[in-house]
Image (spheres, helix red, strand yellow):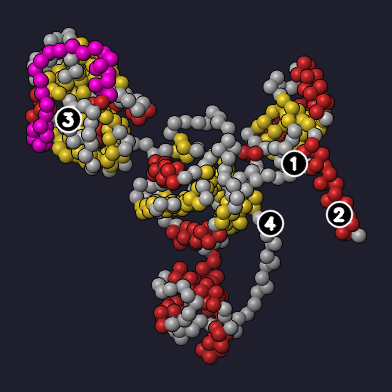
């Protein structure tokens, strides 16, 4: 009787699902959140619109649709409701093939199309609840009894004990399930540390105690096997501390759900070796990957173990059959025992399924920003300033303010550089790239005396790395000395931004009159916005000589059209970035 009843239910559900797939629907709205979709469905129903239904859609969206209808009925209903102003003008007819679980009306029959390989959210595999174990008393065992019970263990069970001893810090040998001198010594050491008689053979009770301590670290992690058909990945995920957030190709994101700031990313995208290596480079720019730690890139995979005082992030990604898949575990630093156990479980359970994450699964929205990659924050410099090439091997002149208190300095965000020379009195620094560069243009310093009120231009990066090429700011030479008659600086009449500091100041012919200095308050007074200063070319040439760099100079006065000057500035000026 029960089987017949269940069979009738199954037949009914399959018939309804088939009808939903073949029917036509008028889709009128899509919402990003379930609460918003429920409110929208309630609103249409209250306004007198009939046949309102709500379905989960691919990509985490929720759709409001009317139906089901025949194709002709759907088209007629669409025209009627549009004309009455009861539904949005961009509503349209769909076949329902993308509909997933029905959420409206509440308690309604799930008239959904069969599941595809791109569900609205990852599925946690159903597991039989484990009954609470009955408390048992483990009698003490003699050494002979312990040896006898040990002989009944399988080799896998012996490996588990070696793993637990290793995790507890008592064993460093091979995990092979073979009990030699190393394993016996580790058992003896564990027994001493836990106030047991040091026999070198664990009793049944001691084995239970050891394994209980090993597994207790996972309390509250609620490791669940998650099968995500959208990414084609199956893996154990600590659902006690993270929950599914959204798809942001190439990631399925599981963000922190409680007090532990953990995060899990499933990585899935089509690609080749070039895309794999590109993903590796992108990972280096994300704030979830601290700059310190081990990085290993192979021909078809990479592994990252990134650590700082706040985060410990692990990533493993591989390329197989045109599919790039892997995972990332972000964990708070200082909780290494628990992190290692969670990571071990994730690594052991990781399995790939067919398919990769559809790049179109998450449509663009208002949360997009240039400092985000797939919703993850990109690491940004402490400051961005300007500099310019002063030698054919790529040496760069900039201000000391640009490179003060930096753990890392880059040129153009790509090339690492070191401070070769600095003069705090003049405020100049010379940077040398770690690998020689071949700049398209090198500064030629003007040693002649320029004419007052002549046109000048400063090249720099007023908006930091937002723009990839330098901008020119035009002005005039207001004075060949500073406000207090300083001979080593020139006063300019132009409005510069902090990012321009360190950039070259050009005369009309493209020769460099000096380097733009950072704006500073003078005795607590703030100067007008159109007052700037540049370090004199003669001072720069002398400083470069002290640094062992031979400067190119000229004393001729020439004229260069604005377009040519812009091209010269782009070839000579470089973004200087200071990183933590």
Residue at the image point whose x is 16% and y is 32% from the top: 391
Give above or below for 488 relative to 275. above
Label located before the other in sequence (4 or 1)? 1
For label 1, the SS is loop
Residue 350 position by quadrant = bottom right
What is the quadrant of the N terminus in the image? Answer: bottom right
Which tag is nearer the camera, tag 4 or tag 2? Answer: 2
For label 4, the SS is loop
In-front residue for pair 362/334: 362
Do residues under tags 3 and 2 come within 8 Å of each other at their CB atoms? no
Q: Provide the residue designation for mark 1.
A: 113
The image shows residue 579 at horizontal and vertical percentages of 31, 39
Task: Residue 179: say if magenta.
Answer: no
Label located before the other in sequence (4 or 2)? 2
Q: Provide the residue designation for mark 4.
A: 126
Disc number for residue 7 = 2
Give the CA separation, mark 4 to mark 1. Answer: 21 Å
Give the CA separation, mark 3 to mark 1. Answer: 67 Å
Give above or below for 258 relative to 347. above
Is residue 42 something one can see in this rendering? no
Disc number for residue 390 = 3
In-front residue for pair 524/482: 482
The image shows residue 514 at horizontal and vertical percentages of 16, 22
Q: Residue furthest front?
A: 321
In-front residue for pair 212/113: 113
Residue at the image point whose x is 49% and y is 71% from the top: 164
């Amino acid at each position: 009787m029960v089987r017949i009843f269940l069979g009738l239910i199954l037949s009914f559900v399959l018939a309804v699902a088939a009808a939903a797939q073949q029917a036509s629907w008028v889709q009128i709205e899509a919402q990003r959140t379930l609460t918003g979709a429920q409110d929208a469905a309630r609103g249409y129903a209250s306004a007198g619109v009939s046949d309102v239904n709500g379905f989960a859609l691919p990509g985490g969206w929720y759709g409001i649709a009317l139906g089901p209808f025949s194709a002709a009925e759907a088209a007629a209903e669409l025209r009627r409701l549009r004309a009455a102003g009861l539904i949005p003008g961009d509503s349209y007819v769909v076949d329902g093939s993308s509909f997933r679980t029905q959420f409206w009306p509440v308690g309604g029959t799930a008239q959904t199309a069969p599941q595809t390989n791109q569900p609205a959210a990852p599925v946690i595999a159903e597991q039989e609840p484990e009954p609470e174990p009955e408390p048992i008393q483990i009698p003490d065992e003699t050494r002979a009894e312990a040896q006898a019970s040990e002989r009944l263990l399988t080799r896998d069970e012996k490996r588990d004990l070696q793993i637990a001893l290793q995790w507890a810090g008592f064993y460093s040998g091979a995990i092979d399930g073979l009990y030699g001198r190393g394993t016996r010594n580790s058992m003896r050491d564990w027994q001493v540390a836990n106030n047991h008689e040091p026999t070198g053979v664990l009793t049944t009770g001691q084995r239970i105690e050891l394994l209980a301590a090993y597994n207790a670290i996972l309390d509250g992690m609620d490791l669940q096997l998650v099968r995500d058909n959208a990414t084609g990945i199956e893996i154990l995920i600590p659902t006690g501390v993270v929950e599914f957030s959204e798809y942001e190709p190439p990631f399925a994101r599981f963000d922190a759900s409680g007090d532990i700031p953990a995060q899990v990313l499933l990585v899935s995208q089509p690609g080749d070796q070039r895309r794999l290596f590109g993903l590796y480079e992108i990972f280096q720019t994300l704030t979830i990957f601290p700059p310190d730690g081990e990085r290993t890139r192979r021909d078809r995979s990479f592994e990252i173990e990134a650590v700082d005082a706040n985060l410990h992030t692990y990533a493993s990604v591989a390329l197989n059959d045109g599919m790039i898949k892997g995972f990332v575990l972000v964990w708070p630093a200082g909780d290494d025992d628990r992190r290692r156990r969670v990571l071990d479980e994730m690594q052991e359970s990781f399995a790939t399924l067919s398919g990769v994450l559809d790049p179109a699964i998450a449509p663009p929205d208002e949360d997009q920003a240039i400092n985000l990659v797939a919703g993850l924050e990109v690491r940004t410099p402490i400051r961005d300033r300007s500099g310019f090439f002063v030698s054919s091997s790529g040496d760069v002149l900039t201000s000391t303010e640009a490179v003060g208190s930096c753990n890392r300095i880059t040129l153009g965000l790509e090339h690492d550089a070191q401070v070769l020379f600095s003069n705090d009195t003049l405020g100049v620094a010379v940077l040398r790239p770690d690998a020689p560069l071949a700049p398209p243009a090198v500064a030629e310093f003007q040693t002649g005396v320029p004419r007052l009120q002549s046109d000048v231009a400063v090249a720099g990066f007023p908006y930091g790395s937002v723009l990839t090429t330098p901008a020119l700011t035009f002005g005039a030479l207001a004075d060949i000395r500073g406000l207090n008659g300083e001979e080593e600086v020139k006063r300019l009449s132009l409005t510069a931004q902090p990012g321009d500091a360190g950039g070259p100041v050009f005369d009309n012919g493209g020769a460099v009159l000096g380097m733009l200095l950072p704006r500073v308050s003078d005795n607590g007074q703030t100067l007008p916005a159109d007052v700037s200063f540049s370090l004199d070319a003669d001072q720069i040439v002398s400083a470069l000589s002290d640094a062992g760099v031979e400067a190119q100079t000229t004393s001729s006065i020439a004229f260069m059209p604005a377009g040519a000057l812009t091209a010269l500035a782009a070839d000579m000026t470089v973004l200087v970035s200071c990183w933590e």
